[in-house]
Structure formats: C-alpha cells, structure tokens
Image (cartoon, helix red, strand yellow):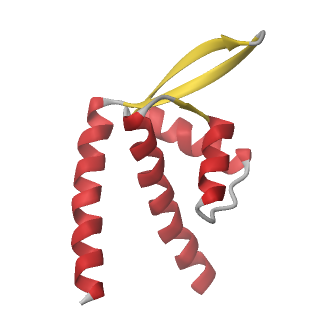
Amino acid sequence: MKNQLTRKLFLGFIYIHILHHGAKEAFFGSWMINELKHHGYDMSPGTLYPILHSLETSGLLSKEEKNVGGKIRKYYTTTPSGEEVLKELKEKAFEMVKEISE
C-alpha cells in the first residue's frame, strides 16, 4: 500500500516537472528521462511516453516533430492551458510545503 501511494504522489511531481520544463523550452523524451533521473526519478521510456501523450491529449503539451541527424525527434512544449494548470499547481504545492514545514 505504501509503495502505491508513494508512486501516485511521485507521479504528480513528475507531471509538474514536465510542465515546468516545457514552459521554459522545448524538450525531447530522452532528455526528460535524464532530467528526472538527475532528481532521483528512475523513469523508463515505457512510463514517460504515455505520460507525455496523456498531457498532449489533454491539451497541456504540444508536440513538434523535427528531423535531427536523419531521425525524427519529438519536441514537447507546454501550451497556454498547460501554463495555467502549472501556475495553479505551483501555488498549491507552495501552499502545502509552507504548511507542512511549519
């Protein structure tokens, strides 16, 4: 039970992290896997890409395909709707961290 709850909470953090970076600049999947790994999240492509697709389907991320070295690479950016959601998530996260830190 503890592992399931922890996984759900960490997934929420990952969604916020993805939207945050997409709002700063376009990123591609393997870069995001390495970025998340830098923060202690061990994420496989089989976990990340469905999340990216879900955020894209929800209108929170947009995708652009670019030819890089003869291969098609998908770059993701946060949409204006995603930026609104991110702003709200940041406010709620800050409020919670502030409360539990007291």
Judge left or right: residue 16 versus residue 29.
left
Residue at the image point whose x is 29% and y is 86% from the top: 101
Residue 80 occupies which quadrant of the picture? Answer: top left
Residue at the image point whose x is 40% and y is 46% from the top: 20
**Is 27 rendered above or below residue 11?**
above
| Residue that extends furthest to the bottom in the rendered view of this protein | 102
What count of labels does the image hold?
A: 0
In the picture, which quadrant includes the C terminus?
A: bottom left
What percent of the width, then of the height, locates residue 26?
49, 28
Kindly tell me whether residue 58 is visible in this rendering.
Answer: no
What percent of the width, then of the height, locates residue 63?
50, 23
In the picture, which quadrant includes the N terminus?
A: bottom right
Q: In this orientation, which residue lies closer to the viewer: 1 or 48?
A: 48
**Is 49 rendered above or below residue 8?**
above
Residue 82 occupies which quadrant of the picture? Answer: top left
| Residue that extends furthest to the right in the rendered view of this protein | 70
Residue at the image point whose x is 23% and y is 83% from the top: 99
What percent of the width, then of the height, locates residue 14?
50, 56
Kindly tell me whether residue 84 is visible in this rendering.
Answer: yes
Judge left or right: residue 42 versus residue 4.
right
**Is 11 rendered above or below residue 32?**
below
Residue 93 occupies which quadrant of the picture? Answer: bottom left
Q: In this orientation, which residue lies closer to the viewer: 24 or 79?
A: 24
